Image (cartoon, grey):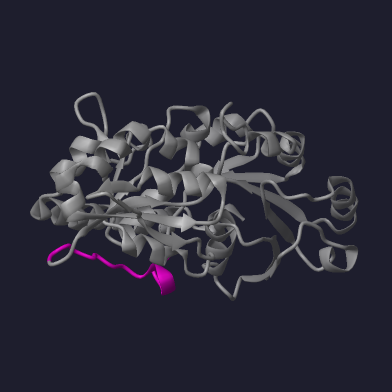
């Protein structure tokens, strides 16, 4: 029986890249332990065959190298985002300070797992032993399927995620202004911001989704940031998800996870062709012939909206089930 130690924290990527796939491993072949820490000591390290970690941790590689030499465990590094952020990204300065650490960890690892072909190509110069393990979403607990068809209620339009997506949302500010100022959309829809934490960036998003009507400022419905234990419920409050992706290297490295998550709760996502380039087509495409605004206007037709909810969820669930089989973590250990 292989013994695995995973260094995790409360970030969503750790859940989908470590916690969830590790829980899928057969109990008769693997014994898994999780710790919320960036470091391990000798008494802990000597008891394991594999140590797994995600990027942006603060492991002491010199110490870990000595322990690996002494006890022969394997180090597996997982990474599901590109570590070089766009020039204007508000987190760029803090992440740039850790670039040397990320690249050192890629070189140090016995094996690297990533989620996309783009990341594979970027990692290959640092480590030849790199493999693509695509994301999937489990089908229990907070991940149970909901369709949430719209019949006798308003349509909920909005955004969901962390502030790391702010630059993408800000890139369609003009479209959001058109959407929130349209009287028909105001009559038929609520605006929703999910993932809110008190900050300058989130407060700007609240202002972006607010509008005036009859002299009164109407603010969006605000759903506070939730933990990895219940964050999926935020998607249940959205029917039309605005999910823009700017055309930059950071977004080319992103996986299809948001489509898989949001469709699980019956969201219809609107986005650019970056998902299409990755081979995923079950969302509403923005291109030179259609905008976020024009697509939202079409989705006011409830028959059309509900038909896409059904179609996208069905198709993405099929993809999700297959990826859970094809990219089981067991195949990479």
Q: Main secondary structure of the magenta part?
A: loop
At horizontal 75% and vertical 61% (from top left) the residue drawn is 37
Q: Can residue 116 be seen in this view?
A: no
Query: Which residue is farthest front?
Result: 215
- What is the quadrant of residue 48 in the picture? bottom right
**Residue 121 versus residue 237 in the image, above or below:** above
At horizontal 87% and vertical 63% (from top left) the residue drawn is 41
Q: Where is residue 23 in the image (x, y as percent from the top left)?
A: 55, 69
Query: Which residue is farthest top?
Result: 288
Q: Is residue 130 visible?
A: yes
Q: Does the magenta stretch include residue 34?
A: no
**Is 320 on the left-hand or right-hand side of 53?**
left
> Residue 230 versus residue 249: which sits nearer the camera?
230
At horizontal 47% and vertical 69% (from top left) the residue drawn is 230
**Residue 101 versus residue 18 in the image, above or below:** above
Q: Point out the image quarter for the N terminus.
A: bottom right
Magenta segment boundaries in residue numbering: 138-151
**Is 214 on the left-hand or right-hand side of 121?**
left
Q: Where is residue 65 in the image (x, y as percent from the top left)?
A: 86, 48
**Residue 200 versus residue 195 in the image, above or below:** above
Q: Position of residue 271 (x, y in %)?
A: 32, 39
């Amino acid at each position: 029986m292989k013994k695995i130690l995973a260094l995790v924290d409360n970030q969503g990527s750790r859940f989908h890249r470590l916690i969830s796939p590790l829980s899928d491993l057969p109990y008769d072949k693997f014994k898994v332990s999780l710790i919320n820490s960036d470091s391990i000591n000798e008494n802990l390290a000597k008891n394991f065959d594999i140590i797994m970690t995600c990027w942006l941790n603060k492991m002491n590689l010199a110490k870990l190298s000595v322990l690996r030499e002494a006890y022969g465990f394997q180090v597996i590094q997982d990474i599901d985002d590109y570590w070089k952020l766009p020039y204007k990204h508000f987190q760029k300065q803090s992440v740039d300070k850790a670039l040397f650490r990320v690249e050192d960890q890629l070189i140090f690892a016995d094996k690297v797992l990533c989620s996309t072909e783009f990341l594979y190509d970027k990692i290959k110069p640092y480590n030849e032993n790199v493999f693509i393990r695509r994301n999937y979403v489990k089908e229990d607990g907070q991940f149970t399927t909901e369709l949430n068809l719209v019949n006798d209620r308003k349509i909920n339009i909005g955004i969901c995620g962390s502030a790391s997506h702010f630059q993408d949302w800000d890139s369609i500010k003009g479209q959001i202004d058109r959407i929130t100022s349209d009287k028909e959309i105001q009559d038929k829809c609520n605006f929703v911001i999910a993932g809110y934490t008190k900050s300058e960036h989130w407060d700007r998003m609240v202002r972006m989704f607010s509008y005036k009507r009859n002299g009164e400022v109407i603010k969006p419905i605000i759903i506070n940031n939730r933990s990895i234990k219940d964050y999926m419920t935020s998607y249940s409050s959205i029917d039309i998800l605005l999910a823009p992706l700017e055309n930059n290297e950071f977004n080319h490295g992103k996986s299809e996870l948001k489509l898989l998550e949001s469709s699980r709760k019956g969201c219809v996502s609107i986005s650019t062709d970056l998902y299409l380039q990755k081979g995923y087509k079950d969302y509403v495409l923005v291109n030179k012939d259609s905008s976020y605004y024009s697509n939202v206007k079409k989705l006011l037709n409830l028959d059309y909206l509900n038909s896409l909810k059904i179609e996208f969820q069905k198709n993405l669930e099929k993809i999700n089930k297959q990826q859970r089989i094809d990219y089981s973590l067991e195949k990479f250990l």
